[in-house]
Image (tube, helix red, strand yellow):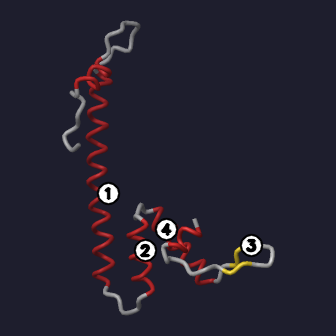
């Protein structure tokens, strides 16, 4: 991943020892932690790159940072709603299935005829 971060310009070239091990500066470690936290929060690499750039820019406007975070939070909310809709639809299909030894299965029928389509998808 470090090479990927380097290729994206998020991290400068990391020095190496004579035996080939990477040597990280304190600044490199801070950037790597920043990137990891951003990834943990689900930001895309493009968003993380923009956030790192803003983090390094002391003349940044906090409005720029807030815009990125708000857009991501809104996207998460949409995805959560879609997943809740999928869960609800699946629960309805599961409730309609007897789960016995008979071959008829409302779950498979719902998948086959599209009746399990959730409202947001």
Q: Identify the element where label 4 is drawn.
A: helix
For label 3, count other residues whose C-alpha is less than 10 Å away and answer few (under 14), some (14-19) or many (20+): few
Tell me which residue sits at (31%, 37%) in the image: 87
Q: Which of pointers 1 and 3 indicates the residue nearer the eye?
A: 3
C-alpha gap between disc 4 and disc 2? 13 Å
Q: Which of pointers 4 and 3 indicates the residue nearer the eye?
A: 3
Q: Quadrant of the C terminus?
A: top left
Left or right of residue 91: residue 57: right
C-alpha gap between disc 4 and disc 3? 24 Å
Tell me which residue sits at (76%, 73%) in the image: 20
Residue 110 drawn above or below residue 17: above
Residue 93 lies in quadrant: top left
Closer to the N terminus: mark 4 or mark 2?
4
Q: Are marks 1 and 3 in contact (CB under 8 Å)?
A: no
Residue 76 is tagged as 1
Residue 63 placed where, x, y %?
Answer: 28, 81
Q: Identify the element where label 1 is drawn.
A: helix
Closer to the N terminus: mark 4 or mark 1?
4
Tell me which residue sits at (41%, 60%) in the image: 42
Q: Identify the element where label 3 is drawn.
A: loop
Residue 38 placed where, x, y %?
Answer: 45, 68
Q: Which residue is mark 2?
A: 49
Q: Which residue is mark 4?
A: 37
Q: Which residue is at the front of the view, 62 or 45?
A: 45
Left or right of residue 107: residue 51: right
Residue 21 is tagged as 3
For label 2, count other residues whose C-alpha is less than 10 Å away and answer few (under 14), some (14-19) or many (20+): some
Left or right of residue 37: residue 1: right
Q: Identify the element where label 2 is drawn.
A: helix
- Which residue lies most toward the right here? 19
Residue 95 drawn above or below residue 35: above
């Amino acid at each position: 991943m470090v090479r990927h971060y380097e290729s994206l310009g998020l991290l400068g070239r990391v020095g190496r020892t004579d035996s080939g091990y990477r040597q990280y500066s304190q600044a490199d470690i801070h950037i790597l932690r920043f990137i990891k936290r951003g990834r943990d929060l689900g930001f895309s690499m493009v968003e993380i790159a923009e956030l790192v750039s803003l983090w390094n820019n002391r003349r940044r406007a906090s409005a720029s940072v807030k815009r990125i975070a708000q857009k991501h939070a809104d996207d998460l909310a949409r995805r959560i709603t879609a997943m809740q809709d999928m869960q609800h639809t699946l629960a309805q299909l599961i409730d309609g299935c007897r789960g016995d030894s008979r071959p008829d299965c409302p779950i498979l029928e719902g998948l086959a005829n599209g009746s399990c389509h959730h409202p947001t998808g």
